[in-house]
Image (cartoon, helix red, strand yellow):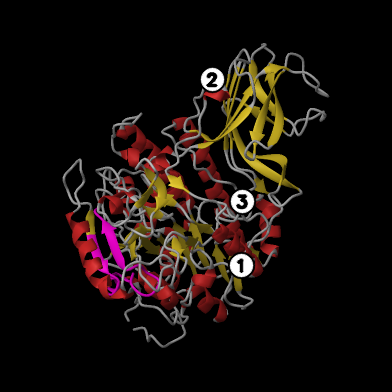
Amino acid sequence: MINLLRNKGLTDKVIILGLDGMDPRFSKAMVDEGKMRNLKKLIEMGSAREDLVLLGAMPTITPPMWATLATGCYPMTHGIIDYNIQVPGELDLTQEAFMSKFLKAEPLWNCTAEAGKKTLVFHWPGGAWPPTSDSENLLVVDGTSPGAMGNTTHKVDEEVMVIATTKTEKAGFVPYGATSSRIDGDVTQMRPAKRDMVMDMKDPRIKEFYENEYKQGLVFQDYEPGIHSIRNGIFYEGSNMDHLADWAIHLSMSPIQDAEGWANAPEGAKEFVIKYTWGKVEKPALILKNENGEYDKIAVYLSKDQAEPLYVLDEDVYTPNCPDIMPTKKGGMVKVVRNMRALEIAKDGSYVRLWAGCAVNCENSDCWYPRWIFDKVNERFGPPPATSMAAGQDPDLILKCSQEQWAQAAEWQAKAIQYMMDEEGVEVVFSHFHGPDLSGHAYMKYLKNRENSVYDESIVRTWHEQTYKWSDDYIGSFIPYIEKGWTIIVTSDHALICPEHDHQEMGDNAGVNIGVMKRLGYTVLKKDQFGREMQEIDWEKTRAVQTRANTIYVNLKGRDKHGIVDPADKYELEEQIITDLYGYKDPVTGKRIVALALHNKDAVLLGMGGELAGDIVFMLHESYNFDHGESMSTACGHNDTSVSPIFVAAGPGIKENYTIDGYIREVDVAPTAAVLLGVKIPKNCEGAPAYQIFTEEM
């Protein structure tokens, strides 16, 4: 029997293998169908519920849930309460909540490092960066954003869809102009994709905030104010989550002409240009003939003066780590790599359809601590690969470009972590990989047939299955470490849901949502001289706003800059809002859209109350929650999707082939790992060790 006060653990080495957005319900279906053999093997080697579910905390969104997994605390205790947190007094201003300065609770990695265990925290987007312990045993890599490792610091520009044709008259660049790779026509016919969120990047509050961040040393080399730190985003229609599966990437268009003025252009070559960085940077390219006289290769150059190309692309071949030199946002030039795919090259050289991934800085070690980790990993495996937001129901972009990048990123990350485990003496790993989440966003809502579906949901399901297959490969690369004495915990922060019905303009994590609150009469827009609504909130008439994933604020006198509600009337106004939310019906289905709405004081039951939370906390019904964030953590959706996180554990100290009765909660993961390792449980922890899965009784 284990004495909880003893220092001896059940294992010497633990890796928390976190996969952002991994769905236990869909994983179970894949396992049952024989499509996730590595996960099946891990389940048989260890312990899990029959349904693989971890009882999730809330809100079901990235930073707060990774902070919960690290600390064993609910968001109201650890302080990272949403993807963004509210700037005090500013109801329309939010700040991204990734940085450790927001984390009020002790993370387990500080406990393990200070207990003498060499600990690696790898790309953990929930209070990990910058490090908060000066222990020499603590090694931290990134954690400043989700998506790609180093997304905040290493990325130099955005991905681009490149179209070149003989009928295009003039080269051009259209920001967010491509929702599909299959584009034909002149750039003058193209328009930027509709953006429902309005942001004023010249807002003086953003400049002031950015300057304050800079003074605190929290701004990286290529940090963009307002993009990675602070937002005044307002959704007048729709929401960000609603449109992720229709996400538009930048578009570069160019005429194709006979090659002229080149230092060394092969005979018969045709030329076009690729525009990067909002059209400010051009790279010349040649379309090359093969020995049969057909065009089937693209050579990209630094300039026409160069005798040799930077790289050569074969038609329809995914080509990783193409080298280039690009300007940084702060000036100067830097070596970069980007992943490319020439999706289509017309045999007569009249058309090119080319995808170019984000450029990644090969030399930036800003978010590696200590920096020697970057040097050693970069030398062996290269810089971290970029990842993609390409979507638009385009199977070429999703399968041939985006998912290829994610598979590459998974392999790179596994090798980097395993190097640290094998060669650098690391004994504890906290790792996060964002693949299932961001890959799933590219198609999630189309897992159910909708009015604008291009492909049947059965086809889209195969895309989702592909995401889980390379995720399974990632998991499988770590299974051999069980024989080396490692205990593995596979978990996630949340999953992604495909709802039965359409989204209801509430609950986006990126800013204020006008829709439902305007219809209920609580948020009011200004009107022009003709009585038409403007895209501007009338704060003198607005009694409450809905902001972030699950929050409503009363526009309160004495607290908020434009407050109009007397504090004496606050409770009754909240009661009225809650009543109206429960009564609000989807105009199409006639069903309520809100599953739960609570006063702040009652939201402590969910771990979501307290001074950092809003006046009202609400959850959307599972049938209206697009992807994740706004619903209860138990929500289930169409096509075997859900919002619950996953939990499987195996290795020393864990029962083999054991089915868990009852639930293990998200707050239980950190104390479970602490007991396994024989280190102290984080001091603010609200969870408990999952004693039922241990090989010894407690």
Q: Which mark is residue 384?
A: 3
Mark 3 neighbour class, 10 Å CA radius: few under 14, some 14 to 19, many 20 or more? many
Q: Is residue 183 visible?
A: yes
Front disc: 2 or 1: 1
- Percent from the top left, x then y, of residue 436? 43, 49
The secondary structure type at the circle numbered 3 is: loop
The tag earlier along the polypeptide, 2 or 1, is: 2
- Give the residue at x 37% y 71%: 557
Vertical arrangement, residue 190 with respect to residue 601, above or below:
above
The secondary structure type at the circle numbered 2 is: loop
Q: Which residue is mark 1?
A: 212
Q: Name the amino acid, label 1.
A: Asn
- Percent from the top left, x then y, of residue 22? 39, 53
The secondary structure type at the circle numbered 1 is: helix
**On the rendered image, what quadrant is the N terminus found in?**
bottom left
| Disc 3 from disc 2: Cα separation | 35 Å
Q: Which residue is mark 2?
A: 185
Q: Name the amino acid, label 2.
A: Gly
- Percent from the top left, x then y, of residue 251? 56, 32
| Disc 1 from disc 3: Cα separation | 29 Å
Q: Residue 493 magenta-drawn?
A: no
| Disc 2 from disc 1: Cα separation | 46 Å
**On the rendered image, what quadrant is the C terminus found in?**
bottom left
Q: Is residue 74 left or right of residue 112?
A: left
Most foreground residue, 412 or 9: 412
Q: Is residue 638 left or right of residue 204?
A: left
Most foreground residue, 450 or 168: 168
Q: Name the amino acid, label 3.
A: Pro
Which residue range is magenta in the image?
A: 596-621
- Give the residue at x 66% y 56%: 377
Q: Are marks 3 and 2 in contact (CB under 8 Å)?
A: no
Q: Are marks 1 and 3 in contact (CB under 8 Å)?
A: no
